[in-house]
Image (cartoon, rainbow, N blue to C red):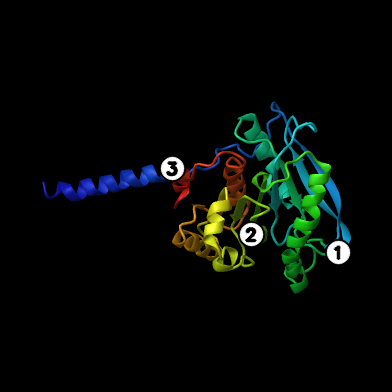
Amino acid sequence: MKRLIPILVTLIFIQTTVCAQKQIPVAPAGFDVSQTEIPHGKIDTIQYVSKTVGATRKATIYFPPGYLKTKKYPVLYLLHGIGGDEKEWLNGGKPQVIFDNLYALGKLEPMLVVMPNGRAMKDDRASGNVMAPEKVAAFANFENDLIKDLIPYVEQNYPVFKDRDHRAIAGLSMGGGQSLNFGLGNLDTFAWVGGFSSAPNTKKPEELLPDPARGKAMLKLLWISCGDQDRLLNFSQRTHDYLADKNLPHIYYLEPGVHDFKVWKNDLYLFSQLLFKPVDQASFLDYNP
């Protein structure tokens, strides 16, 4: 009997581990493969005057299938990485395909998705030394461009809601850091915030949310995710540790992978399905590593 006890303990541990792993969702095979037989959204390029930069700037916008000008929509602002621009998500992440497929399954709340150029400077091309100091500074300057120029343009020209409950911001790498910095720094503007593999531009947690109680009261969803082999994991980890210490509900999602679109497409697939819907904070535990 004594010999059986260690075996039983091992079996229980294995079973518990398997059950826990089943709780963590992943995108199914084919989630990013275009399907001809379903309705498709529309992609367009918009141009807006940026007083922040002193120039006319471009952004890409995705309209959901069945888009109507007579209906109001929430908006997700989706940001790129340090080497990208307003087309990086389209080129590497296929968000239009992911969203089309999710809409066909009835899993998304209809929304507009705005993909801007997060490098707020007159020459905002992703060329030359993308890590030059003035270009890195332009990513921080995008906060003013986003809040004062782009969002007002979108709300003046498209049938969208104009309150924080209907605005979300998320991004990958440098854009993940921007999303956390701008989203948590402007809780009056955003209620839904997501950082995918957030980069070193992410502010220290105590600077992101110096008043955790206010964040807890105002945030609908705070999502932090990263590949478990990503060299930038420590930036997501320290943010999660701070939030956990302050008892602020959030999703911390670790997944197999490195710093690439395989991870970010999966993050977008999961994050987008939670937006602009009633939130069950108890379900956040399903994502815990």
Q: Which residue is mark 3?
A: 23
Q: Residue at x 55, y 39 (%)?
A: 278
Instruction: Examine the image and state in which quarter residue 49 appears.
Output: bottom right
* Disc 2/disc 3 C-alpha distance (Å): 26 Å
Q: CA distance from mark 1 to mark 2?
A: 22 Å
Asked if marks 2 and 3 touch (Cβ < 8 Å), the reply is no
Percent x, y of residue 201? 64, 67
**Dot 1: few (<14), some (14–19), or many (≥20) neighbours within 10 Å?**
some
Q: Which residue is mark 1?
A: 122
Q: CA distance from mark 1 to mark 3?
A: 46 Å
User: Which is nearer the N-term, disc 2 or disc 3?
Assistant: 3
Disc 3, SS: helix
Q: Name the kind of residue labelled 1 in the image.
A: Lys
3 horizontally vs 155: left or right: left
Q: Nearer the viewer, residue 179 or 152?
A: 152
Dividing the picture into quadrants, the one containing residue 126 is bottom right
Check residue 173 in the rendering and tell me which mark sits there, or answer none. Answer: 2
Q: Amino acid at mark 2?
A: Ser
Say what amino acid the circle numbered 3 marks. Gln
